[in-house]
Amino acid sequence: MGNVLHFIISLKVLNTSIHIIPAMKNSEILTCFQCGTCTGSCPSGKYTSLNVRRIIKDSIKKDISDQLDLWMCTTCYNCQERCPRGIKVTDAILSLRAQAVKKGSILPAHRAVCKFLIEMGHAVPIDDIHITIREKIGLSEPETVRKYPQALKDVKTLLESCGFNELVK
Ligand code: SF4
Ligand code: SF4
C-alpha cells in the first residue's frame, strides 16, 4: 500500500512543473505529502515567518533563493527527525541556502559574519575589550587563530583559494 501511495504521489507531483536543484535530488523531497509535521515541530516558526512546509512545497515549483524565511531556520533538525516521509528537510534548507548564496542572495547580517571570518578567522571574534576583561579575572586569550598569526594567515589563504571571499563579497 505504501509503495502504491508513493507512486501515486510521485505521479501527481510529476504532472506539475518541477523545479528542483541538483543538491536536493536525493532528499526524497518529491514524496512530501504536505502533512505539516515539520511546521508543527519547528521552534523557529513559532516566533518568525518561517513555514518549513511551505518552503518544501515552493522549492519544488520555483526558485526561492530570495525568500528571507530560508534564513530563519536554526538547523535544529526537529523537522528532519519527525518527517513521516523521511525527507531530509533541514539538509534541503541548507542546499537551498547554498544556492541562494551562489545567486548573491545573502542577508546583510550574514555577510557581516562572513567578513569577520575573512578578516579575523572567526565568525564571532573576540575583541580587545573582552580580552582585557578576561585578563582581569585571570583568563588568558582563547585558543583561536587570532592568537597565532601564521594560523590566521593559513585560514585566509584557504578561504581565498576555495572562492569563499568571492562568493560573499
Ligand atoms: S513533515 Fe515531511 S511530509 Fe510532512 S510536510 Fe513536512 S516535509 Fe512534507
Ligand atoms: S531545522 Fe529549521 S526548519 Fe527544521 S525545525 Fe529546526 S528551525 Fe525549523
Image (cartoon, grey):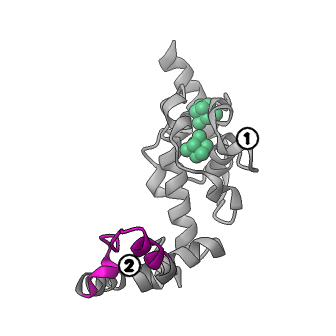
Q: Which residues are magenta?
A: 130-149
Q: Distance from label 2 to label 1 (Cα)?
A: 33 Å
The residue at the point 52 percent across, 73 percent down is 102
Residue 157 left/right relative to 128 = left
Q: Nearer the viewer, residue 62 or 69?
A: 69
Asked if the residue at label 1 sits under 8 Å from ligand 2, the reply is no
- Label annotation for residue 121: 2
The residue at the point 56 percent across, 20 percent down is 5
Kindly indicate the quadrant of the structure image that contains residue 141.
bottom left
Asked if the residue at label 2 sits under 8 Å from ligand 2, the reply is no
Density class for disc 1 (Cα within 10 Å; few <14, some 14-19, many ≥20) is: few
Q: Is residue 105 above or below residue 41?
A: below
Looking at the picture, how far across and down is residue 167, in whole percent?
48, 79
As drawn, the residue found furthest toward the top would be 1
Residue that badge 1 annotates: 46
Residue at disc 2, secondary structure = loop
Q: Dividing the image into four equal quarters, which quarter contains ligand 2?
A: top right
As drawn, the residue found furthest toward the left would be 150
Looking at the picture, how far across and down is residue 35, in whole percent?
67, 28
Kindly indicate the quadrant of the structure image that contains residue 136.
bottom left
Q: Is residue 150 above or below residue 102?
A: below
Hey, what amino acid is under mark 2?
Gly
Looking at the picture, how far across and down is residue 144, in whole percent?
32, 73
Kindly indicate the quadrant of the structure image that contains residue 26.
top left
